[in-house]
Image (spheres, rainbow, N blue to C red):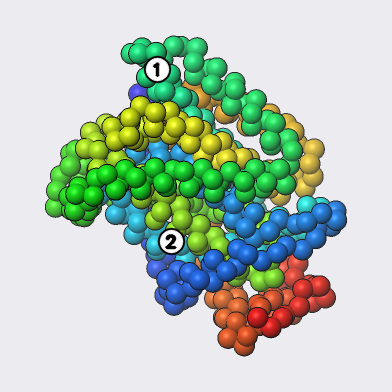
Amino acid sequence: MDSLMDAVSEVNDGFWTYLVIPLLALLGLYFTVRTSGMQFRMIPEMVRGLRSAPERAQDGKRAISSFQAFSISAAARIGTGNIAGVALAIAIGGPGAVLWMWIMAILVSSLAFAESTLAQLFKVKDRAGYRGGPAYYMQHGLNARWMGVVFAVVILFTFSFSFNMVQANSIAEVVSNSVTTVTGAAQPAGWLAPAIGLALVALVAVVVFGGVRRIATVAERTVPFMALIYLLLGLVIVGMNLEKLPAVFSDIIGSAFGFEQIGGAAVGTTIMQGIQRGLFSNEAGMGSAPNAGATAAVSHPVKQGLAQALGVYFDTLVVCSVTAFIILVSDPTYGEAAGATVTQNAMETNLGTWSLHLLTFIVFLLAFTSVLGNFYYGEANLRFLIGDDRAVPIFRIVVLGMLFLGAVSSLELVWGIADVTMGVMAVVNLLAVAPLGALTIRLLKDYQQQRRAGLEPVFTRDRMPDVRGVQCWEVDRETAPERS
């Protein structure tokens, strides 16, 4: 096991240092400049677009709304990455990892906008409304189905297998910690993790066999509720420790640039942990959120691009920051790999044992909805690969088995595997977004022109007749521009 972990770590270090991070930074900077900093100046438009009502799908039911699509992607984003991932980044990379997490989130939110706008442009119709994502804009936008096939296979392994293993592992970790706190045992019983895995498999199976509408409904109803509870707890803890905040910010800045050596973390480790854990949490540039963004029935592709950019802010600058402050005001121990138990212990230190158990419940809900979002990402790309639903039940059963495996595996192994597959997925997606980036700039200009004219932005493909491969956005759409 140790040799496997060493090999995984070695691959991750080189791959991220020389390929993934440079690509993310360069393309994030490119889209920030080309869109004139849309992630700063269009925040009101991001919020406004979530209120749009969806059209009817081909089966006569209401299609997925912009807010539901946002919730599906938020369900995948807001999970153990916000609690266990941030804790792991701080424990290994020191408090400076938080600053690099913030910097990259702001930069790559422009990437989140670009990839989700492209997913909307090249989406296709299905019975429940629409589906799409990087595999679809690779096939229809770049005329490179082979590239779409590669991406679809990679996202299947990344989200449906490795990321879901991380979520299951974190659930097992926090539940085990709660149980040992109650029983007073030094270590959890050997049967506990398998029992947690089996219970999780049963609960997830009930939802995922209901299809995308059930996933959207569950996500829409639970994500805002659980995020609000967690944020309120975090604000209470920060309020109890206001006098420590100046020292916390000093540690974050000093550790980020190597002015202070905290926990023995070198600057490179700090940067790597901040970017890796930030990307795992907000998923910007990875090509995952566009799979959810493409399902929305909106009047203009830019609307969902803006919504997904907002998701990056909410995930990293709000939820991840709350976790960071909960931990950093509680004098954590640095230099040791640990996950959600770090956050649990920090919360217990400030609020008492009851809060540890409440956080167990919150982590369970966050991870549970992340699993649901990850399931949808896998299914959407499986349908791209095979073109029908025959293999979907088998796929669901296999992924349920991976959930059980994640619950009984080691923390270091599941996070290491997730980093490898996440990096590969990001590179494949970014290599497609780069040549298609000019289309997102044109769409943004079209959106802004209509807004300046006092119109509700509506896109039809005759507005960009030179662009081939667009499957939807017919000229005779029922939606027409209206005066705001």
Classify 10 Å Cα crowding around label 2: few (below 14), some (14-19), many (20 and above): many
Camera-side residue of 4 and 396: 396
Q: Position of residue 51 (x, y in %)?
A: 63, 65
Q: Quadrant of the N terminus?
A: top left
Q: Is residue 479 visible?
A: yes
Camera-side residue of 173 and 159: 173
Residue at 49% from the left image edge and 15% from the top image edge: 192
Q: Secondary structure at mark 2?
A: helix
Residue at 53% from the left image edge and 17% from the top image edge: 194
Q: Position of residue 302 (x, y in %)?
A: 60, 70
Q: Quadrant of the C terminus?
A: bottom right
Residue at 18% from the left image edge and 39% from the top image edge: 264
How much space separates mark 1 and mark 2, taking CA atoms? 42 Å
Tell me the tag on residue 182. Answer: 1
Q: Is residue 132 left or right of residue 173?
A: right
Q: How many marks?
A: 2
Q: What residue type is disc 2 on?
A: Val
Q: Secondary structure at mark 1?
A: helix
Sequence-first disc among 1 and 2? 2
Q: Reply above or below: 30 against 446.
A: above
Quadrant of the rendered image containing residue 478: bottom right
Q: Is residue 260 left or right of residue 230?
A: left
* Residue lying farthest to the bottom in this orientation: 453
Tell me the tag on residue 108. Answer: 2
Q: Is residue 464 visible?
A: no
Q: What residue type is disc 1 on?
A: Val
Q: Reply above or below: 388 against 189.
A: below
